[in-house]
Image: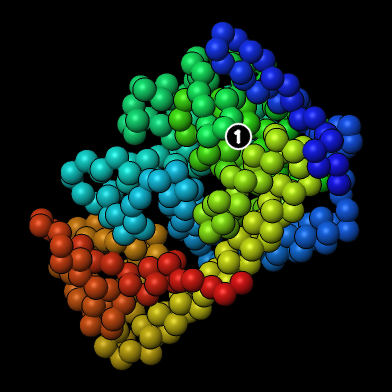
Amino acid sequence: MAIGQRKTGEYQILGDTTYFIPYRQPPTNPALIIDEKISFLYGEAMLHLGRLSEMTKKLPDTDRFIKAYITKEALLSSSIEGIQTTLLDVFTQPLLTSRPNKETQLVLNYTKALSRSLDMIKKEGLPIANRVILAAHKELMSMGDGDSANPGHFRSLGVRVGSLVPPPPQEVSKLMAELEKFINDNDTLPPLIKAGLAHVQFETIHPFLDGNGRIGRLLIVLMLVESNILSNAALYPSYYFKKHHLDYYRYLDRVRTDGDFEGWILFYLQAIRDSSIDAYKRAVDIQKLIEELSEKIMQDKQFDSNRESRLKALSILFSFPVISINELSTQLDMSYNTANKIITNFVDLGFLSEETQQKRGKLYRLMPYFEVLQREYDI
């Protein structure tokens, strides 16, 4: 590999500051070297992405399932940036009248950003253009860091990221236009590898005042869905990036300092492969859990006269794994007393547990589902 020989950009001195301006993608002099090791990892990553995509198609309610996976990616991607909240906080917040804390709001914003950008490319038929990226950033940063992050706009100020001083603000629009062209017009590389190159380029440009890491990781998922490698957003690559966060930043830096695109692509493909395996195992366990809980309802004689309403309530709980009696009543379009009886049944069966820390109004958590969502797998 041509580590240390390939130039990846140029430095520009303005006043007392030296900025790094990356060359456009794909790398040249030499071109990206796809050797045997990269080819092997690429094959493994594609295999496991395919298994994951097919598995999610078989689930009875794909949208419900994807909502949980998007939330998991939001939590992981945000935690890389030091934003700490919990799965319970995120699922509970929609039921509360109080405003969320800043960390929870930013994670909720991430789920909105990914959902909005997916709608733009899948339902509205837009390419992954700066319009989509800016819309995602607006959703991500609104009501979080407020106007200080200038939501939905490229930065107009210089920034520093560790040892990197990204391009001056007047270069950002041009560089992002070049990245947009690479994403949509370049067909010289497999889409999976192109997504990895787009991510490192985005992070080097660092087009926003804040939220660059989260939008850059979101971009990977968007590109895999847009290229039909994934049928939906059933992947959380931040699982691996967080687990190996020091290596993540080191490999990103080595592209700039050593021209080591190959090292980054190897790390990136490992991240995609392992994240796909983790997501697949979780999908299998979620499907098993749905079948197991449904079977308990089917076999319990106390539900002989109202089994259908209990099965419907169970389905709702996988969309609202933290729920109140009022919310279940609304979702079922049944009386409060009926919803209360169902929740009592499910508490007795061990499906639900009461969230006793709530001061006003009882909330209930679908404990077995949380256990699967938070489970650690050996990979």
Residue 305 sits in quarter: bottom left
Residue 352: image x %, image y %? 27, 73
Secondary structure category for the residue under label 1: helix
**Relative side of 231 to 90, left or right:** right
Which residue: 32% across, 69% down?
A: 366
Tell which of 20 and 272 is nearer to you. 20
Which residue: 63% across, 31% down?
A: 204
Residue 121 sits in quarter: top right
In this figure, which residue is indicated by the disc labeled 1?
203
Q: Is residue 216 above or below residue 325?
A: above
Tell which of 341 and 166 is nearer to you. 166
**Relative side of 293 to 53, left or right:** left
Residue 156: image x %, image y %? 50, 14
Residue 120: image x %, image y %? 57, 34
Which residue: 37% across, 75% down?
A: 368
The extreme front residue here reads: 16
Q: How many marks?
A: 1
The extreme top residue here reads: 15
Would residue 17 be visible to someone looking at this image?
yes
The image quadrant where one finds the C terminus is bottom right
Tell which of 338 and 3 is nearer to you. 3
For badge 1, the amino acid type reads Glu
| Mark 1 neighbour class, 10 Å CA radius: few under 14, some 14 to 19, many 20 or more | many
**Relative side of 268 to 101, left or right:** right
Q: Is residue 328 above or below residue 346?
A: above
